[in-house]
Amino acid sequence: MNQISRQHQEDARACRPGRHKRTAIDHHYARYPLRRGLVGNMAYLFGMAYTHLGIYLHAEGLKNIPKQTPYVIAANHETYVDGMWIGSFLPRNHFRLMSCIAAKDLEDRHGLLGKLIVRVGRAIPIDRFGNPVRGLIIARKKVEEGNILLVHPEGTRSIDGQLGEFKDGAAYIGLKSHVPVLPVFIDGVY
C-alpha cells in the first residue's frame, strides 16, 4: 500500500461521524510530550544520585504546589538540569505528568546531554529563533490534556546568574488553559 493510499484512509477515518479531522499541528506533534521511558527514568535516577553527591538541594514553599493537575511551572533557568531538580520536589504522581518546553535545537546541538534532557524532561520543542507559536499551541493542548508544564520564561539559561527578560509563553499557556502558574526561583547554582 503506498503512502498516498494510507493518508487517504487516515483522512477517511478521521472524518467519520463522532471524530474530528486532525489538524497539521495535531498530526506533526502527536508524539509530544515524549515518553520518559527506561532511558529517561534511568538518566533521572543517575542524575539525581550524582547531584546528591555534591549538592544539597533545598526547597521552600512546597505547600504552594497545587494539589490538582494540570498547572504550569514558571522557573528561572540557571543550569541544564534545573528541570530535573524541580521535578524532584514534586509529588511522584505529578512528576510522572511533568513535561517541559525545550529549545528545538537541544537534541541536535548539545550532544548526548541534550538528548537525555529531552527524554527526562518529556520535551515539547519550541523554535526560539523563528516562530514559537506552533510549540506554544502544542504545549497549551498538552496542559489541557492534564500534563504539568515546566517553562523557563527567560527562554534560555542565564549567562551571568541574573534574571533575564521574560517572554510571554508561560503566561499565555496559563491564561489560555485556565490553569494556575506556579512561580519557582532557583538560587545558588550559578
Image (cartoon, grey):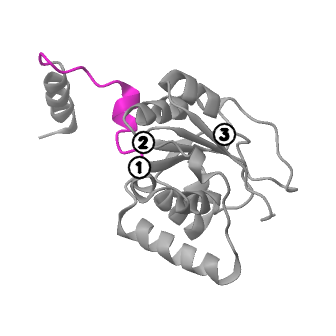
Q: Residue 82 location in percent, x, y?
A: 65, 59
- Magenta segment boundaries in residue numbering: 16-33
Is residue 103 visible to the viewer in this orientation of the structure? Answer: no
Q: Does the magenta segment cover residue 166? A: no
For marks 1 and 2, give the CA distance: 5 Å
Residue type (three-letter) at the residue carrying disc 3: Arg
Amino acid of disc 1: Leu
Numbered badge on residue 128 = 3
**Residue placed under numbered mark 2 in the picture:** 147
Q: Nearer the viewer, mark 1 or mark 3?
A: 1
- Mark 1 closeness class: few <14, some 14–19, many ≥20 residues within 10 Å: some
Type of amino acid under label 2: Asn
Residue occupying the point 68% across, 56% down: 60
Residue 68 visible? The answer is yes
Please report whichever mark, 1 or 3, sits nearer to the chain's N-terminal start.
Answer: 1
Q: Residue at x 12, y 19 (%)?
A: 16
> Which is in the foreground here, disc 2 or disc 3?
2
Answer left or right for 20 relative to 102. left
3 or 122: nearer the viewer: 122
**Corner quadrant of residue 101:** top right
Q: Is residue 129 above or below residue 15?
A: below
Q: Residue at x 52, y 22 (%)?
A: 176
In the picture, the quarter occupied by the N terminus is: top left
Q: Image height check: is 119 above or below 141?
A: below
SS of the residue at dot 3? loop
Which residue ends up furthest to the bottom in the rendered image? 53
Residue at (17, 18) in percent of width and height: 15
User: Reading the chain from its start, which is encountered first: label 2 or label 3?
Assistant: 3
Q: Residues within 10 Å of mark 2 (few under 14, many from 20)?
A: many
**What residue is pinned by disc 1?**
97
Q: How many angstroms separate mark 1 from mark 3 (CA)?
A: 24 Å
